[in-house]
Image (spheres, grey):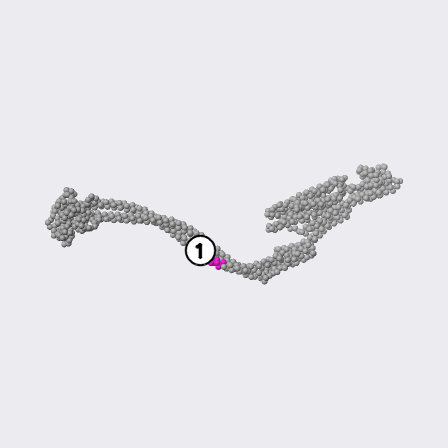
Amino acid sequence: MLKTLTLKATLTYALLDLLFAPFVILAFTQLLGTGAAADPWLTMVGLTLLKVTVWAIYLSFELSPWERFARTAPKGRTPELTQAADRALQGLPIRFGIVYSLTWIATYGAGFLVVKGLGPERAPLPAQADNAVAILCLAVFFGGFAFAYPLASTLTADAASECSALARAGKYSLDRSPSSLQLRIAVVAMALALGPMLWMVALGYIKQVESSHSERVTHAALAGSQLALAIAAVNPTEGDVQLRAVLDNFQQQGIEGLVLDAGPPHGTAAATRLLADDAELTRWLDTETRKKSAGTRARIDWPHVIAFQRIDPNRVAVAVLRAPVAASASFVLSSIVFTLLVGVWAPVCAYALGRAVSKPIGKLTTIARRIVEQGDLKEIGTVSVAANDEIGVLTEKVNDVLDLMRDVSLAAHAIAKGDLRAVVDGTGELPDSFRGMLESLRGMVHQIRETSVDLASAAAEIFAASQEQEAAAASQSSAMVEISRTMDSLSESAAHVSDAVQGVLGNAERTLHNTDDMVRRIGELTSHANRIGEILEVIRDIADRSDLLALNGSLEASHAGEGGRGFALVASEMRRLAERVTASVSDVKKLVSDIRDSGSSTVMATEESKKLAEGTTDAARQITFVTQQQRSGTEQVSQSIKGIADVVSQAVSATSQTRTSAQGLKTQADRLSALVKRFELSAEAP
Amino acid sequence: MQPRAERTSTSTRLLTIHGAGGVWGIPSSAVASIEPATAGAATAPPALLALLGVVAPTEPHERARVLVLEVEGERVQLLVHGALELAEAAAADLLQLPAAVQAVTPLLSHLAVFDGKPALFVISPERLLQAARGAVTAIPLHDSARGSSC
């Protein structure tokens, strides 16, 4: 229910700490002899709370990497963060155990100093109390460590396991220093043994001191009584000599004697000097001797004990015993020896006990490592079982697991050789899963057999189809290449045609221009011919008139008779000339007419040529336009054909690859079929 | 053979007309002049062939002339087509047409024979004048373009 490990650990330790604290404080005050005095109790309670605060702060500091890890969302837990948290968890038990133990030492050391500081009047302490407290501090150190270390290991185990699981899931390893279970057990055992034992030694030691104090008080009281009897038995006549002998006798026994009467006290020098120096003692004796007949005055931190005994109504015997309190040497010696024995024997025993645990675990670890690293199950024998304890049960179960793994391994070996008839006995998830896997494998092999046959058949069909497709694609590719060449040639032809048509167009346009020029010139020629015709008409008219004139002349000459003969000759000649002119005019006129006709014909022909030239020009332009379109179209078609050729080429390549793949597929299918035939299926297999 | 001059005693000069309608001859002594035919004249002179009763197509190249005859002091214009020539015919070569023929063709008087072969008919100017009178009014001499020069 506690949300964080820090809070959980703090509350756990605080609860246990505060639970133990009253008993420890009680024992401590008893050890110091302060009893139920309030001041030491309040002091120790305050120091205990301070102790809890200190180690709680330290614990919070130690667990801060883990708390950062825990606060981070699972997706954000990086290997570095996990490593830091795990490192804190791994080191926490030993470090916190030491710190926790030191806080105990500090608490009780400081408590002792505070109590000692109260002074002998409020807290009288024997000189041996320092030793006892030192031993007690060692005891609480070991006891605290024996308490803190395993508890810290227990509290952090789950968290450390979580880090380990996360690292395994993340495929990385944590940097953990190797540790020994035996060593940890030995250390804990030693601390566990030494802590209580030293505590008891401290208590025994202080009890020895207290016993020594009680003994000397009793001894002093007894000595006082004996001194009183001895003094009472002294003959008064013999006076001070006999008294001096009694006192000397007691002094030889370590008792300083003194007699109080109406006069000044007289006794040994030491007792007299003690009485003279200690006014308090004098007052106490004066007071006590009036009220009681006997009494003792002693304190554990004082080096002497005072005892008085009334001898008679006028005299009192006082005995001073000078004997400081001390533990017996035998106790100290036996305590030291026993502590050393326990300090040595406890780890040895713990080591032996740990070995009884760790040795079988080590064997199991070795076996597990061989299985994991070498996978060798045949060479691993059965692990011997020493006892029917937890380790023994664990070993038995490991042997069962080994047997199961051997069975599974043998079955797997048989499966690997193709024998699927293997049988695995046993119950549990692994054998059940293995049997299920084996059954599935049989079904799969059966299906693979059928599928491989189908696959080989399909691959053969694909191979054949791809061959045909490749041939067709190759033919298409060749056709495309040929078409592409043809289109290129067509494009070139179109270019040539276009050039030629351009030439034709130029020629036609020139012809049109020349025709227009010719028509114009023929028009001029016709005009000239018409003019010539007009002139010829005039000449012909003149010739006609000359002929007529000559004819009339001839008539006149014939009318004149012989006299007109000469004139007749002239007229005849003139008429002949006129006729020749007329004939020439007729010829010329005919020529002019021919020229005119030719001109007309030429004009008509030229018009026709012009029309033809215009038609040729239009046709050439249309041809040029069409040729350009054809050329453009041809180029586009050529580009398309090239693109198609590329696609077809790719198709050829792809088909070739398909054929190769189909061939490989068929090979693989045949190989698969051959491989599957190696498997031997049971009769009931599908 | 060239025709001789009209005024000789042994020969007669003829104005021959060579046209599509045949070859005809008129004594040149009766021809006062030859004038060109006027296309745009108000009254056209009678055609010779029409008077002769010959129907012949007019060739387009044939030249049209107007003969001005002067017979018995009267002048008559005749439109002729064809080439006009002056020829001289010996008296022996002019054969008188029989009366029966002349009764049928009153305008013809003689048949001219050249080189022993009949060459043309000779038209009588007097009869032509008579025939022309029926067709056109005779032109007084003083109205003639040429006037009488014979």
Identify the image quadrant of residue A479.
bottom left
Q: Is residue A477 magenta?
A: yes
Q: Residue at x 78, y 41 (%)?
A: A299
Any part of residue A55 in sight: yes
Any part of residue A503 in sight: no
Task: Identify residue for label 1.
Answer: A477
Q: Residue at x 44, y 56 (%)?
A: A476
Q: Nearer the viewer, residue A353 or A524?
A: A524
Q: Is residue B104 left or right of residue A385?
A: left
Q: Nearer the viewer, residue A236 or A518?
A: A518
The C terminus of chain A: image quadrant: bottom right
Which SS does the magenta portion mostly show? helix
Q: Is residue A161 magenta?
A: no
- Provide residue A679's location: percent of width, then percent of height: 57, 61
Q: In the image as oriented, which residue stretches furthest toward the right?
A: A237
Span highlighted in magenta in the image: A462-478
Instruction: Indicate whether A386 appears above or below A19.
Output: below
Q: Nearer the viewer, residue A123 or A2?
A: A2
- Provide residue B55's location: percent of width, then percent of height: 19, 50
The tally of labels here is 1
- Provide residue A493's location: percent of width, then percent of height: 38, 52
- Under circle 1, the secondary element is helix
Dot 1 crowding, Cα within 10 Å, few <14, some 14–19, many 20+: many
Q: In the image as oriented, which residue stretches furthest toward the bottom?
A: A683
